[in-house]
Structure formats: C-alpha cells, structure tokens
Amino acid sequence: MNIPKKKQIGTAGKTRWTDLLSQAVSLMIVFLMLASVALTSGRLFGKDITAKAASQAEAAPTYSLPTPQELADLGVPNATLSERDSAIWDVTTSDGKAIGRLYNSARWGKNIIGFAGPTPLFILTDTNGRVLHITAQANQETEGYFGQASQLLHAWNGKTPAEALSQKVDAISGATYSSRAIIGNVQATFSALETGSSAIGKTPLLGWIKTVAVIAVMLFGILAAWKFRGNKRVRITMLVLNVLVLGFWTGQFISLSLLRSWMENGVDWIGALPAVVMVALAVLLPYFGRKNFYCTWVCPYGSFQELAWMLPLPKIKVNAKVFRRMKQLRLVVLGIILLMLWMGIGAEILNYEPFTAFMFTSAPIGVVIFSATFVVLSLFAPRLWCQALCPVGMLLNTAEDRTIPTKKAKK
C-alpha cells in the first residue's frame, strides 16, 4: 500500500527540482539579456572589453586633458599645461606665470562610480596646494541629479589636501549616488597625495542609519509575506513603510538604470548595500515560494499605487482578460526598450522611469508629472503602471518563470 505513495512523493520531488532548474534557466536568460545591453557600451562589470582596450592593456594608462570648456570652468581658459605625469599637470598663464597644479581624479578614483558610471573630476590647486576650482568631466549621470550634486564642487575651495580629507561633506538629498561619487573622487585624489594611497573607508552611500532602516523594512515585508498574508492592517503598514522609507526617505528601488549600470560598471557591494540586498531578495525569494516578492511586497511605487487604490472612490472593473492583455503590453514595452538599448539608442528613456520621482527635489518635472499620473489613475484601477507598463516587473517576472514545461504530480 505504501509503494504508490512513495512513487507519488518521488514524482512531486522531481517536479520541484525541475521547476527550480527551469527558474534558474530563466534567471540566466535575463542575466544574459542585461549583459548584452551592457556590451553595447564596450564595458562589462567595469572592464573595457573593446578591441582597442585589449591592444592597450599592457600600455601605461593615460588620462585625458581638460577640454577648453573644462579649462574655462576651472577659471583658467587660456592656461598652458605641462605634464608632470599621466594625470598631473603644472598650470601656467600664457606668459609663464605659475598658477598651480591640475589633477585628473580618474587615476585614483577609477573604481568610484555614481549611479550610471564613473564620475571623474579635474581638481585645480594653487601654488600653495590649496583648491582653486573643481569641475566634473563628461559622465553618464542623469543631468538633473548630477546638476544637484554639482553643488558640492565648491565645498573644498581654499582647502589643502589634508584639510579636504578631514572636512565632512554631506551628500545632496535626492542625488546620493552622484554626490558620493564626487566626494569619493576628491577623497581618493587627496588621500593619494597625502599618504601615497588612494584607499578610502567603505561605507554605504546612504549611511548606516538609512541602510539599517531599508533592510528592516524589507525584513518586515518578508515577515508579512510569510506570516501575515491576508492581514489588512499589516499590509497597509507595510505599504506605508515602503512608500515613506524606501521611497521618499532613502530613494531605494530597482530600476533598469540601476541594473544596466551594475552590468556596465560593476557593483559597489558596500556603497550600494541596501540596493544589493533588495535585488538579492527579489531574485532569491521566488525560489522559496514567494513569486513576485519585490513587486508585491517591496516596490515603493507599486505600494503607492496600491494605497491609492484602497481609497474609497468609484472603481473601474477590470476583468482577467484585460489583465492578460496588460501583461502582454508590458512584455512589448520591455522588448522595445531592450531593443533600443541593444542598438545603442534611447538610453535617455531610462531617465524617465517613474521610481525616481520619489526624489522630487532633483527629479525632472516631467518625471514627477508622469509618475503622479499613474498614482492618480490607480485611484480608479489597480496598479496600472505595474500591470501594463513596468519593464522592471516584467524582467523580474521573466527571471522567475518556468521555461521548461513540467507535469504536475498526481494527487
């Protein structure tokens, strides 16, 4: 009598392992999709993989000279530069009068990245070694956010390297990644000049207080998903925490911009610790029976839409067929965006992901309006952005779907 039961359990176990393998295959497919997007930039995990880079691998590194515009931004438009080494130049006027010395921080801050990539600086000091001006070199940061962070470029004027290292400069709220990249480049450059080493202390970009708060909210989401499913009070508390803590206070969310940046430039495991934990949970928890965990229990923008839907207003009835059409539309949107990125065009569209509207002090007004529109629409229909358009949700869903058909165990 026990033989059929044992056979049934064995079949169920085999099906479970097949499902896990299938999900792993799906995750690998998504990883390769993102890697192929990064490859169009010629970089993968912070390494230049172009043929030109390979041919220069054994050559001494060279660092760019400032453009005429960058010299003007430094306040020395007609200066003459004399190279001291690959990233340091003596700066004089056209008649030979010494102005000071110019440093390209790319030499010492090569592993420091902002939100979208490296953010090197030109640092000009006077003949006494005090900072005259700092200006940013060309980078891939979003213009609005980096514009906010650029307020920091004047913070070290008049400081010696030692004074600059001891000075506490806070990141600009709403432009944390870009701000900390600027601070990190200054610290790495002056640390090398003072001590001979560009190593600087590694801490989360948000600071430890916000980092702990973000992780605590996500742990509460896990507890709610496992132990309090169906408890309305717990769910509303979780949604509010997601919006206030993950959204408005810390600006932590998964976006295509973030994933693309990590694939191109590598991951700052400590600096981006809250986001690393968030992505890890989004990827791993579906293997433990919690599909759509990030979208359902973490995403601050999805939570904002759900809170709007809970308000007692007239609702639009949406049947299952319409929801299926929405998911198909979401797949089309993801496909179009990836196709554009593979073709090397349309990267600017990633600047308009609605998640960034939480950082409303620095977000473009168009993003704020776009994001607010879907929150308003969610008063009458549930999570319209999540259901019909969100490429991040579609990407995560694809990563956890089964790609290999399996037979259900017979009951």
Image (cartoon, rainbow, N blue to C red):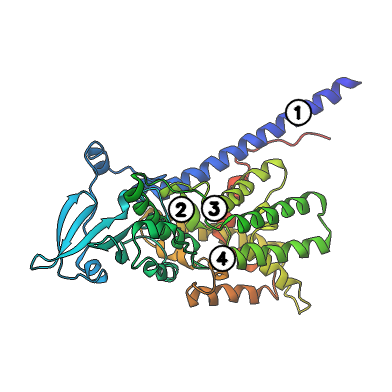
Q: Residue furthest bottom?
A: 313
Pointer 2 local density, CA inside 10 Å: few below 14, some 14–19, many at least 20: many
Residue 112 image offset from top left, x and y in percent: 41, 51
The residue sitting at 44% across, 71% down in the picture is 148
Does dot 4 land on a helix, a strand or a loop?
A: helix
Report the amino acid beneath label 1. Answer: Thr
Report the amino acid beneath label 3. Answer: Pro
Query: Is there any visible trace of residue 340 in the rendered image?
Result: no
Image quadrant in which you'd find residue 161:
bottom left
Report the amino acid beneath label 4. Answer: Phe
Report the amino acid beneath label 2. Answer: Arg
Q: Earlier in the sequence, mark 1 or mark 4?
A: 1
Instruction: Name the residue beneath numbered marker 3.
Output: 204
Foreground label between 2 and 3: 3
Q: How many marks?
A: 4
Image quadrant in which you'd find residue 387:
bottom right
Q: Earlier in the sequence, mark 1 or mark 3?
A: 1
Q: Residue furthest left?
A: 95
Q: Which mark is residue 355?
A: 4
Q: Earlier in the sequence, mark 1 or mark 2?
A: 1
Pointer 1 local density, CA inside 10 Å: few below 14, some 14–19, many at least 20: some
Q: Judge by depth and name the residue closer to the eye, 175 or 168.
A: 168
**How far apart in space, not on screen, are marks 1 and 4 (Cα)?**
43 Å
Instruction: Name the residue beneath numbered marker 2.
Output: 260
Report the quarter where the N terminus lies: top right
**How far apart in space, not on screen, are marks 1 and 3 (Cα)?**
46 Å
Q: Which mark is residue 11?
A: 1
Q: Earlier in the sequence, mark 3 or mark 4?
A: 3
**Proximity of marks 1 and 3: CB atoms separated by less than 8 Å:** no
